[in-house]
Amino acid sequence: MEFRPCIDIHNGKVKQIIGGTLTDDNDFAKENFVSEMGAGDYARLYREKGLRGGHIILLNGKDSPYYQADLEQAADALKVWQGALQIGGGVTAENAASFLDMGASHVIVTSYVFVDGEIRYDRLEELISKIGKKHLVLDLSCRKREGDYYVVTDRWQKYTRQPLSESLIQQLSSFCDEFLVHAVNVEGTGTGVDEELLQILSAESPVPVTYAGGIGTMEDIRTIQKIGRDRVNFTVGSALDLFGGTLKFNEIVTNFRN
């Protein structure tokens, strides 16, 4: 199990938000923390600690007036830690290679692949033809509804008709290098991890899986380690002292460096 750092960018600033509140209306989200540091500053810290595999998420839509500012922040981070960070937000087959050219190790994709509630395998194939499987991370972030977890798109606002399951993970693993899964129901709350979702993610996957959502204490991280059978990676947002929380970044790095 490895710690994967994060840089979430919203309205041109590094932030931690409550994921379930994110909306395109007026580019709104309830904020837990707004940093005075830029994305490049966080990338420099991650580089100093040797932390690879972290993700940059552009939280504004491509039509937002803030998207370009988000992109500029991301570009600064990718320039600082070349080939070590992943990026997601508005990625398509047409622009995926440009993010790799900027210095990303991988692009992270959800909405481009899950269209009208269904998986577009033709788009997956097109992405692979453009950048290769080894540069693709599929974001299977999900919300619970009527007892099942459904993959959500468009900055976690729209439900697909695709339940998250062990069989889906096995099926999609042939198209990507990793999975990223935000537990949107608890994302940004620090109220504890989603243990039921972790049970699904704990099934042996041919590619790495990173979990995010609800982590507030070291005990939560140990829960991920136990339920995830020491093979589900994790990221910490609002609870981390780098983002105004109480969990010590250096302690986590010491114990779970990748």
Image (cartoon, rainbow, N blue to C red):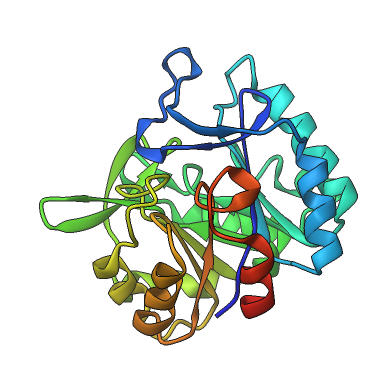
Q: Looking at the figure, which quarter contains the C terminus?
A: bottom right
Query: Is residue 92 shown to the viewer in this render?
Result: no
Please state which of residues 171 and 48 is positioned toward the viewer in this rendering: 48
Pick out the residue farthest to the front. Answer: 246
Q: Position of residue 140 (x, y in %)?
A: 42, 57
Residue drawn at the location 12% of the way across and 57% of the way down: 147
Pick out the residue farthest to the left. Answer: 146
Please state which of residues 39 and 250 is positioned toward the viewer in this rendering: 250
Q: Position of residue 48 (x, y in %)?
A: 86, 63
Residue drawn at the location 60% of the way across and 76% of the way down: 2
In-image side of 157 versus 225 (left or right): left
Q: Is residue 10 above or below residue 213?
A: above
Query: Is residue 200 shown to the viewer in this render?
Result: yes
The image quadrant of residue 21 is top left
Q: Position of residue 4 (x, y in %)?
A: 62, 65
In-image side of 98 versus 208 (left or right): right
In-image side of 122 versus 148 (left or right): right
